Amino acid sequence: MVDAAYALACFGEDLEAMTALVDRALAFNPNYARGWHRSGFMRLWAGNTDLAIKHAETSIRLSPRALAESSSWLIGATLFFSRRFEEAVSRLRVAVEDHPAFSTPCRFLAACYAYLGLVGEASATIARLRTITPEIIPSYPLPFRNPEHCELYLSGLRLAMGGETAAQAAGPSRPSS
């Protein structure tokens, strides 16, 4: 049930309804590490950053080796949306090294560096990203349902590419959800 709900959420189905299915599955089996992991991603997409981290950490606690690699980018992205860029960098660096051909953690890392004002690191990460894909700014629909998160992510990428100042890209500071 969890994988089906996750897949449907990936393709734009009602995230709230799919999350309810995952919650139900976790109520039946609270030791289902993959379920907690999938729930973490769905909470991230919904914009619930605190719960996304909690569910990712539960997944890691239940199965430290099985999901650790993708949990690094999940937690890194969640920290990014919480504007905890310095903390996000360490998680995202692990994710980039664990999955060198996966562009998403690399994009988040470049945006983090840009917001931290680390221009050289941002440029190097964009250069690395270009070896993976010619598409720096994703053209596909983003899974993040919070428009502020989408804009933070895209602005960070533009900043990393040298298109905005940090103040323009970051916008007003808002508390995380």
Image (cartoon, helix red, strand yellow):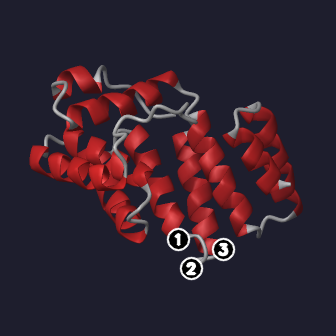
Image mark for residue 158: none
Do tag 1 and tag 2 residues touch (Cβ < 8 Å)? yes
Residue at 81% from the left image edge and 35% from the top image edge = 17
| 40 on left or right of 167 | right
| Image spot of residue 172 (x, y percent) | 30, 20
Please identify, in this view, whether the residue under mark 3 or under mark 1 is nearer the observer: 1
Neighbour tally class for label 2: few under 14, some 14-19, many 20 plus, Cα within 10 Å: few
State whether residue 167 is above or below residue 105: above
Image mark for residue 68: 1
First in sequence, mark 3 or 1: give its number: 3
Inspect the image, locate mark 1, and give the three-letter code of the amino acid beneath it: Ala
Secondary-structure class at tag 1: helix
Q: CA distance from mark 1 to mark 2?
A: 5 Å
Neighbour tally class for label 1: few under 14, some 14-19, many 20 plus, Cα within 10 Å: many
Residue at the disc numbered 2: 65
Residue at the disc numbered 3: 62
Q: CA distance from mark 3 to mark 1?
A: 11 Å
Inspect the image, locate mark 2, and give the three-letter code of the amino acid beneath it: Arg
* Quarter of the rendering containing residue 90: bottom left
* Quarter of the rendering containing residue 131: bottom left
* Quarter of the rendering containing residue 25: bottom right
